[in-house]
Amino acid sequence: MTNSIARPATQPQPQPQPQPQRQRQRLLAARLSPLLLLLLAALLSLPWSLAHAALATEFRLQNGMKVIVKEDRRAPTVAHMIWYRIGSMDERNGATGVAHALEHMMFKGTKKLKPGEFSAKVAALGGRENAFTSKDFTGYFQQIEKSRLADMMALEADRMENLVLDKGEFEREIKVVMEERRWRTDDQPIQKVYEQLHAAAWTAHPYHHPVVGWMNDLENMTVEDARAWHDRWYAPNNAIMVVTGDVDAAEVQRLAEKYFGRIKPKQVPVTKPQVEPVQSGLRRLTVKAPAENPYVALAFKVPQLKDVEKDDEELALDVLSSILDGYDNARLNARLVRTDRVANSAGASYDGIARGPVLFILDGVPAQGVTTTQLEAALRAEVTRIANEGVGEAELKRVKRQLIAGQIYKRDSIFGQAMEIGTMEMSGISHRQIDRLIERLGQVTAQQVQAVAQKYFGDDALTIATLVPLPLTQKPVPPPPSLRH
């Protein structure tokens, strides 16, 4: 599931779907050209050091801010991103949603800029900009013509150091955030399911809370809460700058030192580990909401990726998810949707790169005349089939090619490269391990896939959420004007 909330852009953004991995992989499969497939084959046959020569440059400013630069000169554009290693998982009870609320306020003025002037300046320079908040981090980005990079750094450094949090602006903006919650979660049945699924799956870990926050916390939030969050966490030594595109690393370092080097570091609090207790039995919940179809999601607790060199199971789980749902003719779609016709849709996802614990999710919409209980059994039967019978080498090879092709395809976009670097760094895995991670995925064996299918899909660590549809009383309406910034 996606756990990021972007600040609303000029046009309403499409709703995040429960299984973005599935959609991404199918899109990649559809868009892979014969030339790219030939390139992929060549990459898989070359020594890894020869296949990936373009490495990123990394340095650290004296105030502790890390800067990572990936040169890509195919177009005269640059992606500039500032990542703060702070997200909703770092919030406390009673103040959920403050990370996202502050993200909104970062566009509401500094000592130098009036509210909205940041975005106006970026637009006037021909760029686009936005921000996102997740459970693990908060990020801000601009995509701009390469000669305007210095302007972007000046703007970001200004709001890191000189943000102005006005009470009146906050009281207006928190209403926008509450309306965003209503539109993106309360009025979206699948999103309501996933909010309740995480709340049930995680009892102690702060992943229990939604990124946008609980409504009652938003209703009682004050500008002082946002100010304290900024003062505590928004510091150069808790941030990473990622720059990709048509740039020179030495020039980026000069600009970073000029605009960010003078900002003083802060004593960033050390967070205590919050370990989720071992689950010892199946958890089940029901969500009733107006919807066209029933829906079911099965969430299994599985390990997260921490060490690219040592974590074999995590890589095998990634491959398993792709065997089940990595391309149009993958097992779930082929059997449950096309052959047995017990589901209108069926999917699987696993994303092991995170600061906290992770889930492996099976989900689906049952076909007419099929119950969610029957679809549950059908979804689990496909994993059981792999656990009992294993995976053939031809299928495994095809799936790994899809996975690796997806990783390579990301590099067609300077923004995609920046996102990949930032996400890895925020999760505690060096960006220098990106290519090694791809190589390790290529080394996963059929025996390893079968072993994780046997180990992690019992009842003890399973949470099941079912959507029971209520009658639709009205047609969906577009977001209100307040969400169209």
Image (cartoon, rainbow, N blue to C red):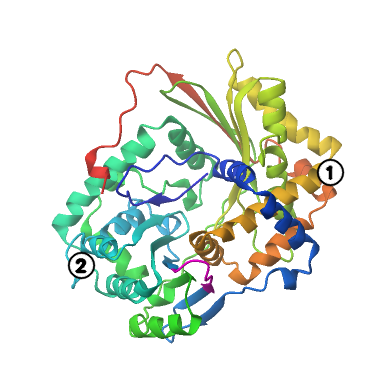
The tag on residue 416 is none
Position of 196 compared to 121: left or right? right
Element under disc 2: loop
At which x and y percent is residue 50? 74, 72
Horizontal and vertical percent for residue 113? 19, 68
For label 1, the SS is helix
- Residue 57 x, y percent position in the rendering: 55, 78
Residue 71 forms part of the magenta stretch: yes
Label located before the other in sequence (1 or 2): 2
Between 105 and 248, the one nearer to me in the picture:
248
Q: Main secondary structure of the magenta part?
A: loop
Image height of 57 relative to 357, above or below: below
**Residue matched to label 2:** 164
- Give the magenta-colored segment's residue range: 70-76
**Residue 418 versus residue 89: which sits nearer the camera?**
418
- Residue placed under numbered mark 1 in the picture: 394
Above or below, comparing residue 167 to residue 81 in the picture: above
Q: CA distance from mark 1 to mark 2?
A: 59 Å
Query: In the image, what residue occupies the spot 34% across and 62% down?
Result: 127
User: What amino acid does circle 1 point to?
Assistant: Ala
Q: Is residue 215 left or right of residue 91?
A: left
Depth check, mark 1 against mark 2: the one in front is 1
Residue found farthest to the top: 369
Is residue 430 visible in the rendered structure shown here? no
**Residue 187 against residue 404 in the figure, above or below:** above
Residue 215 horizontal side relative to residue 438, left or right: left
Which residue lies at the image location 46% right of the left edge and 32% below the top edge?
Answer: 190
> In the image shown, does 437 or 199 lie closer to the viewer?
437
Quarter holding residue 438: bottom right
